[in-house]
Amino acid sequence: MPRTIWSGAISFGLVTVPIHVVSATEDHSIHFHQYHLADQGRIRYRKVCELEDREVDQSEIGKGYELTKDQIVPISDEELSSLPLPTAKAIEIDAFVPLEDIDPIRIGDGYYLQPSSQVAAKPYNLLVKALGRSAKVAVAKYAWSGRERLGILRVRDDVLVLHAMHWPDEIRDPAELLPPPVQVADEEIEGVLALMDSMTVDELVGPEFEDRYTEAVAEIIEAKREEKPLPEAPEPEQPAQILDLMSALQESVSKAKASRGQDAGPAEVHELPAPKKKTAAKKQPARKTATKKTDAKKTSGSRPRRPRSA
């Protein structure tokens, strides 16, 4: 049973659903320790007070915000847990939006939400059924680990999942990463589309979607434990000499089809959509409507950076 990370409630209007939060993912990576090469002694990090030059116990350590190099404002865990915020004790649902309206770059780690009691089962299942039928996700705010966060609630196999989200001002502008302008031919776009078709799968299963790195590290560890020769690394395939982009795309399509046992015939050509003709917009009579709040308007000004806890 996974460990409970946080306990609180989902607040939806006047409905409250007591829940426990557990991590939705597991780390199966192989982790290493640092050790002294001379005698294989473990290398450990110790917490030392800079003023007293001595190692301190965990019970002597607290959090604080550094105003200046000589002035620290201490903040206790009790003070953080009793912040004057509704999101300190509850996941507050603020809105519902289609999932496709959310930029995936803003979506972070996932957590399962478990009803904390039999009493919570009915409102929990009610929210699950409603979200599943509406095909929307709930946008919520909550406060964990010394900061208020934004998240979305969705349904996975009849279980509520909370995904952490980045605030809009936490997403870097990619404009400076844009490549210089170049001309791309329609035939080249069609070649990429053909390659995408040849690499399309129904689900992410199979050896190409398994963690080969962890398996390879495990083989090395096992070989050294049994004092056997280390497994040899396969020779990297030498790429063929391709003189132009279209030849590279056609060669890639053929290889992708061959790897799936398909006939490596001519690539399927996609018709590109015709450009839309611009038409003069007709003037509409003025109507009094409530302006719709958008994410951009909410964040037109940059949010002040919050001090991070130690």
Image (cartoon, rainbow, N blue to C red):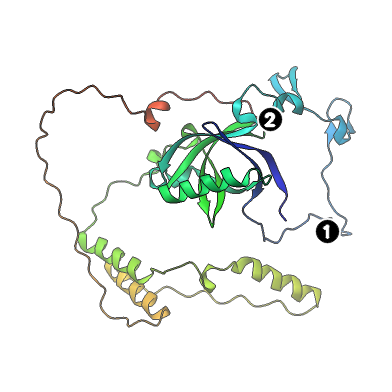
- Rendering coords of residue 221 (x, y %): 75, 70
Front residue of this view, candidates 246 and 59 = 59
Is residue 244 visible to the viewer in this orientation of the structure?
A: no
Which quadrant is the C terminus positioned in?
top right
The quadrant in which residue 297 appears is top left
Proximity of marks 1 and 2: CB atoms separated by less than 8 Å: no
Q: Residues within 10 Å of mark 2 (few under 14, many from 20)?
A: few
- Rendering coords of residue 192 (x, y %): 30, 64
User: What distance separates the C-alpha of mark 1 from that of mark 2?
Assistant: 35 Å
Q: Secondary structure at mark 2?
A: loop
What residue is pinned by disc 2?
309
| Residue at 31% from the left image edge and 25% from the top image edge | 291
Amino acid type at mark 1: Leu
| Residue at 47% from the left image edge and 32% from the top image edge | 169
Which quadrant is the N terminus positioned in?
bottom right
Front residue of this view, candidates 280 and 249 = 280
Q: Earlier in the sequence, mark 1 or mark 2?
A: 1
Q: Determine whether, in the image, residue 179 is placed left or right of residue 170.
A: left
- Rendering coords of residue 181 (x, y %): 28, 46
Looking at the picture, does residue 50 appear above or below residue 263?
above
| Residue at 29% from the left image edge and 68% from the top image edge | 194
What residue is pinned by disc 1?
37
Q: Residues within 10 Å of mark 1 (few under 14, many from 20)?
A: few
